[in-house]
Image (cartoon, grey):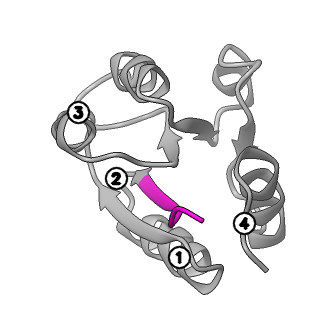
């Protein structure tokens, strides 16, 4: 089975670190990017099974990244503290901040086959 890797596109370091730690406890290799530009550089050279993307980033809208990630076969989960903004990204899987780690894991398990 191919290892699962995740790209966490999140500018709030505390949230990014918590998400990364939770994913790593599930055997998922996690990489954190604090901006759209950084995430775009990563997706050009590396393959990720999953991308968890905050919708409010310091360098703009993540739409171009989401499109690029999906075009490369990554499953995308959108995250935001703004429920109205989040709703505009349906039918992607959505996580409203603040979220419980259990809700995060449920979304991840639905998006990718997580080993037990």
108 lies left or right of 36: right
Q: Residue at x 43, y 17 (%)?
A: 67
First to last magenta residue range: 1-7
Kindly report which numbered mark, 3 or 1, lies closer to the viewer in this rendering: 3
- Per the model, the C-alpha gap separating discs 2 and 4 is 25 Å
Kindly report which numbered mark, 2 or 3, lies closer to the viewer in this rendering: 3
Precedes in sequence: disc 2 or disc 4: 2
Residue beneath label 2, please? 11
Q: Residue at x 53, y 80 (%)?
A: 24
| Secondary structure of residue under mark 1 | helix
Kindly report which numbered mark, 2 or 4, lies closer to the viewer in this rendering: 4
Question: How many discs mark residues in the rendered view?
Answer: 4
Mark 2 closeness class: few <14, some 14–19, many ≥20 residues within 10 Å: some
Residue beneath label 3, please? 40
- Per the model, the C-alpha gap separating discs 3 and 1 is 22 Å
Choose between 27 and 106: the one closer to the eye.
27
| Secondary structure of residue under mark 2 | loop
Residue that protrudes farthest toward the front in the picture: 1
Label 4 with label 3: CB-CB less than 8 Å: no
Mark 1 closeness class: few <14, some 14–19, many ≥20 residues within 10 Å: few
Residue beneath label 1, please? 18
- Per the model, the C-alpha gap separating discs 4 and 3 is 25 Å
Q: Residue 71: which numbered mark, if any?
A: none
- Per the model, the C-alpha gap separating discs 2 and 3 is 14 Å
- Per the model, the C-alpha gap separating discs 1 and 4 is 18 Å
Precedes in sequence: disc 3 or disc 1: 1
Residue beneath label 4, please? 114
């Amino acid at each position: 089975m191919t290892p699962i890797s995740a790209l966490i596109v999140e500018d709030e370091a505390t949230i990014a670190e918590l998400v990364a730690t939770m994913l790593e406890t599930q055997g998922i290799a996690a990489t954190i990017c604090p901006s759209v530009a950084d995430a775009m550089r990563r997706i050009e050279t590396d393959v990720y099974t999953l991308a968890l993307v905050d919708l409010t980033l310091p360098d703009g809208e993540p739409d171009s990244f989401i499109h690029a990630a999906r075009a490369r076969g990554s499953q995308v989960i959108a995250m935001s503290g703004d429920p109205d903004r989040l709703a505009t990204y349906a039918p992607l899987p959505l996580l409203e901040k603040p979220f419980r780690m259990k809700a995060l894991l449920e979304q991840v398990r639905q998006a990718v086959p997580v080993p037990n």
